[in-house]
Structures are given as structure tokens and as C-alpha cells.
Amino acid sequence: MSGPVAPEDTAAVDATATAAAPALELGDSRTADVGGSTVRRALPRRERRTVGAWCFLDHFGPQDAGVGIGPHPHIGLQTVTWLVEGEVLHRDSLGSEQPIRPGQLNLMTAAHGVAHAEETPTTYTGRTHGVQLWVALPDATRHGPPAFAHHAELPRAGIGAAVATVLLGTFAGERSPARADTPLVGAEIALGGGEVDLPLDPAFEHALVVLEGELTLEGAVVEPGRLAYLRPGREHLRAGAADPVRALLVGGEPFAGTPLMWWNFVARTRDEVDAATREWNAGSPRFGGVASPLARIPAPLPPW
Ligand code: MN
């Protein structure tokens, strides 16, 4: 379910191109293949590489097939896994073996290096639908030890006709217990219909993707496969729906620095990516081993 990031996701962007953009920008996700499944990749895009520290957003399914991604490494990021439908078993080089179900959060902090595998258990035969996101870690923690946390219960906030489940950070007065190393927010918004005024942190930039249904934001209809982006400075966002809709809101203080993303690595320099590539492919203890029946995925050589 993770990555990889390809060159077309991360091509250089002209920073001045977005300077005069409107308050609500609508962009398209691109279609990517991850382990044989087609996903909608909302981040990174050429025109929008990060939203706060959020640097990667894949929306997969709903699909009849499960997922199966063999052992692969990460550095410099947190993986955030959230399911709408399905069941996925996470195994990592820290010894974690954790199933995740809808409404729960798996949060793996790669930092200096970790490896994991994700697969749908053979006992699960239903549909699979969810998102995986990455959060770029700041310099203060990206070289630190890896960690894994499963949050079976998350706080929920009622906002009029909507219910928000807070994955990371604070939203509508409710604070997630999950680790966040930079000021950010991640929340799932479920709206049965009608209109709602979503409270936003004006210090944050924000983005919304729709997981199910159609959401109207200031006259614009947003559906799965699109990304609605909001620059900092907003305290509210009016959202409406005729029918039930489920969306994911992410946001944060604009990320300090430019993450260099290649494959499953988030770094700052090519030397860091080169070292991670070399060490994973050599079986270095930096990443450890994952007890998975799936095949280990070798790192492709960077394009430079
Ligand atoms: Mn991964």
C-alpha cells in the first residue's frame, strides 16, 4: 500500500506558479499501480508536493481484491494507514504484527529506518477500501529510532450533521493520542447530508480528498480522485452534501524545507537516498528483517 514514488510525482515545480492561486484549488489525483492495485495518488503531485508535513496520499479501492505488499524499507517518514472497508495485517522489523480494521489507525514512524509488509489476511474475503498517507518527519526526529503504534480508539467530534474522527493532531476540540512531530491535523469527516461549517486552524494549509460520495465545497463538487487545497489563513470551510459522504481532511503548518522523495524514502539529499538504497539492498541491519511470507522488494536505483 506504500509507494513507490515515481519521478512524475516529484518533478520540480515553479514555486511562483501557485502564488496567485485562488483560495480553493482543485487538482486531480493521478492513477498509480501499487502491488497490482490501482490507486488515486493525490500527493505528491507536480503542482502540490506537500500539505503541511503530509507528503503522500494514496486512496485505494473500494476493490474486491485485497492488498499484498512484501517487505520494503522506509526512512524519514511516518506511514498512516486508515481503512474504510477491509482488513490489513501489518508486520514490521520491530517485531510488530498488527491487524488493522476500519476506524483504527496504524502509525509507523520510520525515522532512521524500518521495514514492513502489509497484506490482507486470507480469512478476509470482503472489499478493501482505504488510504495510506506519509508524514515527512522534521530534522529533529527523522534520524531517530523507529516506532510503531496502533490506535484502536480515536476521538470523535460532532460538528452539526457531521462526525469527525481525529487521526492526528487536534480537530474541532478533540485531540488524537497519536504521535505527531510537527503541527498538523488529519481527520475523517462523515456527513450524512446537509451542510456543515468545518473549523480550520488559520496557521495551517489544508487539503480534502473524498473517499465516498460527493462533497460540495464553496460551489465546487469534489469527488474521489480530486484534491481540494486551501492555503493558510482560513478559519472555516463550508461543506455540503446531498447524500452521505466521507472525506479525509489533512493539514499542517507549511513544511519547513523540501523533502526529497524517492521510492519509499523521504530524505533531504541524494546521498541519504543512495545510502538507504545501498543498505536495504545489502540486507543491512539498519532496516532489520520482517517475518512475512511475501517476497522482499529490492530498492530500484535512483535516477541520478
Ligand atoms: Mn510501506
Image (cartoon, rainbow, N blue to C red):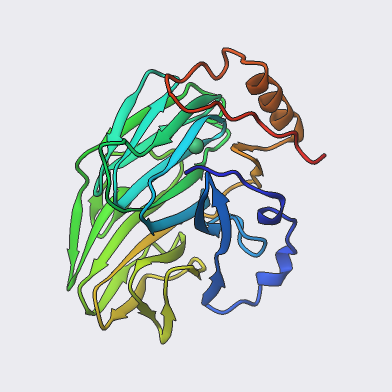
The location of residue 256, given as percent across then percent down, is: 60, 47
Q: Quadrant of residue 273?
A: top right
Q: Which residue is at the far top?
A: 285
Q: Which residue is at the far bottom?
A: 219
Residue pictured at 55% horizontal, 65% vertical: 29
**Nearer-the-camera pick, 166 or 291:** 291
Looking at the picture, does residue 271 appear above or below residue 80?
A: above
Q: Which residue is at the far right?
A: 304
Is residue 96 in sight in this rendering? Answer: yes
Left/right of residue 299 with respect to residue 204 in the rendered view: right
Looking at the picture, does residue 218 appear above or below residue 30?
A: below
Q: Quadrant of residue 211?
A: bottom left
The location of residue 291, given as percent across then percent down, is: 42, 19
Is residue 52 in sight in this rendering? Answer: no
Left/right of residue 136 with respect to residue 206 in the rendered view: right
Residue pictured at 30% horizontal, 30% vertical: 98
The location of residue 290, given as percent across then percent down, is: 46, 20
Residue pictured at 61% horizontal, 61% vertical: 48
**Nearer-the-camera pick, 96 or 168:** 96
Left/right of residue 1 with respect to residue 246 in the rendered view: right
The location of residue 61, given as percent across then percent down, is: 40, 57
Residue pictured at 23% horizontal, 56% vertical: 173
